[in-house]
Image (spheres, rainbow, N blue to C red):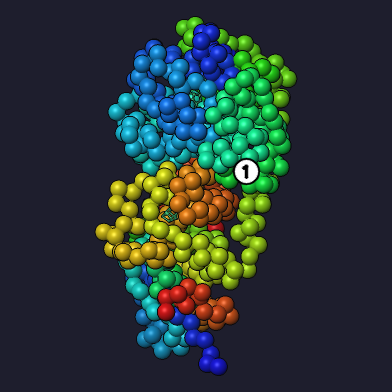
Amino acid sequence: MEEFEPKIIGFFCNWCSYTGADLAGTSRTKYPPNVRIIRLMCSGRVDERLIAKAFTAGADGVLVCGCHPGDCHYQKGNLNARRRVAGLKPFLEAIGIGGERLRLEWISASEGPKVAETVKSFTQTIKKLGPSPLKKEAE
Amino acid sequence: MKGDMYIARSPDKETADKAECGGAVTALLKFALESKKVEAVVAVKARDGNRYDGVAVVITDPKDLIETAGSLHCASPNIARFLKEYLDGAFNSKIAVVAKPCDAKAIIELAKRNQIKLDNLLIIGLNCTGTLPSAKAKSLFKEQFEVEPADVVGEDIEGNELIIRLKDGSEKKKDLAELEEKGYGRRENCRRCETNIPVMADIACGKWGTTDKDSTFIELCSDKGADFFEAAIEGGAIKVDQPSGNAVESRKKKDQAAVESAQKWQEKDFATLEEMSAEEKFSYWSEQFSHCIKCYGCRDACPICYCEVCFLEAERGFIPPGEVPPHMLFPMVRITHVMDSCVNCGQCQDACAMDIPISRLIFMLSKKIGAIFKHEPGMDVTALPPLRTVTDQELGQEGVEVTF
Ligand SMILES: Cc1cc2nc3c(=O)[nH]c(=O)nc-3n(C[C@H](O)[C@H](O)[C@H](O)COP(=O)(O)OP(=O)(O)OC[C@H]3O[C@@H](n4cnc5c(N)ncnc54)[C@H](O)[C@@H]3O)c2cc1C
Ligand code: SF4
Ligand code: SF4
Ligand code: SF4
Ligand code: FES
C-alpha cells in the first residue's frame, strides 16, 4: 500500500512565518512537501470559517503560524488566533475530526529552521492520525 | 440594598388569587408601569387561554397585567429574541421584563453584542427548574396522569415530584425521574440547567423559601433592582416580611439539590456524545447533519446569532447555495459562531424540525470552552465572548504560549 501523504493547509502570516518559510527555502532547508501555504496579512485573519473551509475542502491538518506574542504588526492578531485555535480544538474533537489536526505555532521571520521542524513534526502527527474523515466526504 | 431578601406578596386580592405565589411579580410589574418607571412590560400569557401556548406579550396598560399572572410551565417563549426583534432591544424605551434564568442569560449575551440596551431594562427574574415541551406535556398528562390536558390548571416541580393541579381543585403527583426515564418530563436543556436562581437579573423571585402558595421569596440582585423594589415597598405596591433563617436555608438547599440533579444530567447527556470513538463521533454527526433541511430555525431562534447578514446565507458566497442537506460548512459555521457563548436555552433544539441534538452539542462545547477561558456565558455583561476577546492582561504578558 502506498504511504499516506497528508495534505496540510498552512495559514502563514506575511510578516513572520511566511518570510520564515521563504528563508527556509532560500537556505535550502529540507522539509516535507505536504504543506500548502496560504499567505495572510496576519494570523488574526484566521477564523472558524477559514479552518472549517480547509477541512471540508479535504485538508488532513491545518497549521496556523503567526508572529511571536508582542511582535504582531496589528498588536493582537496572533492572540486572537490563539484563542480561536484553542476554542476550535474541542469542537473538532467533538465531531470526530480530532483536535490534533489543528496546530498553532509562533514563528518569526528569522526562524527558517523552526518552519522546517514544525512542518516535519506536524506532518508526522497527521501521518499517524491518518486521513481526515471529512476528506472522504470532500472527494 | 443589593443582597437583601424578602418574602413578598401583592396587596391586591384579585392579583394574589390569579397569580402563582402571591402575585409579587405581577404587583412589581404593575408598580413599574403605574410609577412610569417603564413604558412597557414584557411578560408571558396563555394565548386564547391555552396554557400550552404561552407567548411573550407587551403590556402598557396596568389593567391588562392580570392576564399574565401565573406560571406557565409548558411554555418557553423566546423572550430575549422577542425584545431584540420587536422592541428594538429596548434602545428606545424603558421596559420591565420577566425572565427565567436562561432568558436573563440570553438577554445579557445580546447586550454584550449591543443588541439590547441593558440600562433601559428592569429584569424581574423567576427561579426555574424547568419547563415541559408543550406538545409532549399534553401526551404526558393524557398517557401518564390519565387526565385531559385542558383540565390541568397548574404544575409544580417539588423535589423529585411533578405535581399537577386540576380544575376541580384536586392534585396528582408522579416521580419526575421515572417520567424522565420514560422520555417524558422537562425539556432536555432544562434537565441539565444548573442556573435555577436568576442572580444575573435585577431581582430574583421564586417560591423556594416559602411554605405556602401565597408568597414569593425575593432576592435583590442589583442596585437598580434594589432601588426599584424599595420604591415599590414605599409606594405600598407590595407587602413584605423578612424571611426567617429557615426560609433562607431551605431555599439554598432546594437550589443545591437542583444544581446536583442538573450536573448529573449534564454528565449523562455529554456522555452520550463523548463515549464514542472518533470514527463513531464523525459518523454520528455526519448522519445527524444529513437530516438538516436548512430551515434556519436554529439560527433564527438562537439569542447568540444576531448578524445582520449571516454567513449561512447564500449571498455571503460561503455556503454553496441550493443544497439540502446543506454542505457540512453550514452546521460547522453555525456551531462555531455561538459555541463560546451558548446559554443552554434550548431554543435551537426546540426549533429544529429534524430533532438534531444541537443544543446538547453546543452547550457541551460552551462548557469546555468556558473551562479553558474561565468564562461563564450570560452572567456578567462585561465578560465578553472568549473566542473574540483578547484581554489587556494577555497583551502585556511576556512569552505567551500557543496553548491556553
Ligand atoms: C416555568 C417556571 C418554573 C418555575 N420553577 C420554579 C422553581 O423551581 N422554584 C422556584 O422557587 N420558583 C419557580 N418559579 C417561580 C414561581 O413559580 C413564581 O413565578 C414566583 O414565585 C413568582 O410568583 P408570583 O405569584 O409573584 O408570580 P405572578 O405574579 O404569578 O407572575 C408570574 C410571572 O411569570 C411570568 N411567566 C409565566 N410563565 C412564564 C414562562 N414560561 N416563562 C417566562 N415567564 C413566565 C408571567 O408573565 C408573570 O409575569 C417558576 C416559574 C416559572 C414560570
Ligand atoms: S446554541 Fe441553542 S441552546 Fe445555545 S444559546 Fe443558541 S439557541 Fe440557546
Ligand atoms: S451563524 Fe454566524 S454569521 Fe450566522 S447569524 Fe449566527 S453568528 Fe452570525
Ligand atoms: S433547525 Fe435543524 S433542520 Fe433547521 S437549519 Fe437548524 S439544524 Fe438544520
Ligand atoms: S502580523 Fe504576524 S501574526 Fe499578526
| Residue in front for this viewpoint, B319 or A43 | B319
- Label 1 marks a residue whose chain is B
The x, y position of residue B181, in whole percent, is 68, 47
Image quadrant containing the N terminus of chain A = bottom right
Q: Looking at this view, is A40 or B77 the one in front? A: B77
Q: Is residue B199 visible?
A: no
Residue B354: image location, x then y, percent: 47, 55
**Which residue occupies the extreme left position in the image?**
B315
Q: Measuring 56% from the left and 37% from the top, which residue is drawn there? A: B138
- Tell me the residue at 44%/37% (across/down): B78
Vertical side of B123 occupied by A59: above or below: below
Q: How far across and down, in percent of the image, does residue B171 sit?
A: 67, 25
* Location of residue B163 in the rendering, given as x and y in whole percent from the top left corner: 66, 29
Up the image or down, B343 lies above or below B73; here it is: below
In the picture of the structure, the residue carrying the numbered disc 1 is: B184
In the rendered image, the quadrant that contains the C terminus of chain A is bottom left
